[in-house]
Image (cartoon, grey):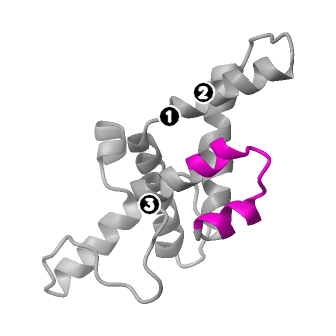
Amino acid sequence: MLRQAFNDDALGKSQVYEWFSRFKSGNMSTEDMPRPGRPSTGRNDENIAKIKRAIDEDRRKTIDQLSEETNISWSTVQTIQNFFLFPRMKRSLKGKRFRDVDEVKENALKALNSIQPQEFQHCFEQWQKRWDKCINAHGQYFEGD
């Protein structure tokens, strides 16, 4: 019901259950608790800019090469490319006809350069919300929110 009334501004069901459990046990904080393991490094403007610069230098680089060059994990580089950069680029090029490969490259580069760092940041925040849902579901199947 909250999602129907407030759309994406409402907490998801699993987050409501988690907070209820915390509040019931006496922990009234809504801040994330410290987590074990390596901290997330992909979701910052510096790393986003590194990937974008590396791709701008040579768009033929593989994910392995980008990962090694930028010192960002392979899976983070893949996520940046597959779920954010390429769909954005395809949307801006869709339905247009180009004379040659150079014109395609030129327009693709313009599309990539038009993406603002804040948009990259938002992409990573949404990605983290999705992986948090998976973790909170403890491996159980769920659909949507």
* Between discs 2 and 3, the one toward the N terminus: 3
Label 2 secondary element: helix
The tag on residue 43 is 3
The tag on residue 111 is 2
Left or right: 72, with 17 as reference point: right
Q: CA distance from mark 3 to mark 1?
A: 15 Å
Find disc 1 in the rendering and name its residue.
115
Q: Are marks 1 and 2 in contact (CB under 8 Å)?
A: yes
Q: Which residue is painted at 47% across and 88% down in the image?
A: 37
Kindly identify the amino acid type of the residue bearing the numbered disc 2. Ala
Q: Which residue is painted at 69% across and 29% down in the image?
A: 90
Residue 1 appears anywhere in the view = no
> Callout 2: 10 Å neighbours few (<14), some, many (20+)?
some
Q: Are marks 2 and 3 in contact (CB under 8 Å)?
A: no
Label count reads 3
Residue at the outermost front position: 57
* Between discs 3 and 1, the one toward the N terminus: 3
Q: Which residue is painted at 85% across and 22% down in the image?
A: 101
Q: Position of residue 33 (x, y in %)?
A: 28, 81
Q: Is residue 59 above or below residue 36?
A: above
Q: Position of residue 67 (x, y in %)?
A: 66, 66
Q: Position of residue 55 (x, y in %)?
A: 66, 47
Left or right: 42, with 75 as reference point: left
Label 3 secondary element: loop
Label 1 secondary element: loop
Q: CA distance from mark 1 to mark 2?
A: 7 Å
